[in-house]
Image (cartoon, rainbow, N blue to C red):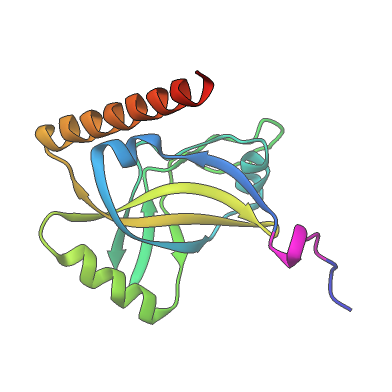
Amino acid sequence: MGIARQRGSNDEPVVQPICRNRRASHEYELHDTIECGIVLVGTEVKSLRDGNANLEDAFAKIERNEIWLVGCEIQEYTFGNRLNHRPKRDRKLLLHRREIAKFALKADQKGFTLIPTRMYFKDGRAKVEIAAAKGKQVHDKRQSLKNSEAKREMDRAMSRRRRG
């Protein structure tokens, strides 16, 4: 008998968010995303359950057909002892070879990099969402801000029209 897993409605997996990389969508144009498993030690999992993670300066790199998460900070577990983990260590991401090959092709293109966008628990297992992203120029950021402001203004006008 396996362990019974708690499921949401319609047998969907239960997803508990840990943290998001809000700067990713502002500074990068996100193209493809993929869900990866992550290799952690016990105190890292306990710290993640407390919500102590930061993806702001993190990125992923491909080394010898493996993907590594670099710069992700998982704070030390408060009740950990001398066996506590290092907060900024490199962590291995778990993907199939064909998925790594696909993302390696995307990351090798000029201007593309692999950026973690969010971290979450899915059915009790820690997952990281990685996106192949291209850096935005200053004028691209301005254009994004103009588009979002125009959309916000249209939504306001539509809501005023509905009310009045």
> Would residue 58 appear left or right of 119 to someone viewing this image?
left
Identify which residue, 97 or 32, lies in the foreground: 32
User: Residue 91: horizontal and vertical position, in percent?
Assistant: 45, 55
Q: Residue furthest right?
A: 1
Identify which residue, 40 or 80, lies in the foreground: 40
What's drawn in magenta, residue-wise? 5-13
Q: Quadrant of residue 155?
A: top left
Identify which residue, 97 or 21, lies in the foreground: 21
Q: Is residue 142 above or below residue 98?
A: above
User: Residue 95: horizontal and vertical position, in percent?
Assistant: 45, 71
Identify which residue, 62 or 106, lies in the foreground: 106
Is residue 64 visible in the rendered image? The answer is no
Indicate whether residue 8 is drawn in magenta: yes
Is residue 12 visible in the rendered image? The answer is yes
Residue at the image position 67 percent from the left and 42 percent from the top: 49
Q: Is residue 104 above or below residue 157?
A: below
Q: Is residue 3 above or below residue 111?
A: below
Residue at the image position 11 percent from the left and 38 percent from the top: 137
Q: Quadrant of residue 132?
A: bottom left
User: Residue 136: horizontal and vertical position, in percent?
Assistant: 17, 41
Residue at the image position 34 percent from the left and 56 percent from the top: 131
Residue at the image position 12 percent from the left and 32 percent from the top: 138
- Tag count: 0
State whether the magenta stretch is mostly helix, strand or loop. Answer: loop
> Would residue 140 appear left or right of 89 to someone viewing this image?
left
Indicate whether residue 11 is drawn in magenta: yes
Quarter holding the N terminus is bottom right
Q: Residue furthest front?
A: 164
Q: Is residue 35 above or below residue 99?
A: above
User: Residue 96: horizontal and vertical position, in percent?
Assistant: 44, 77
> Would residue 153 appear left or right of 9 to someone viewing this image?
left
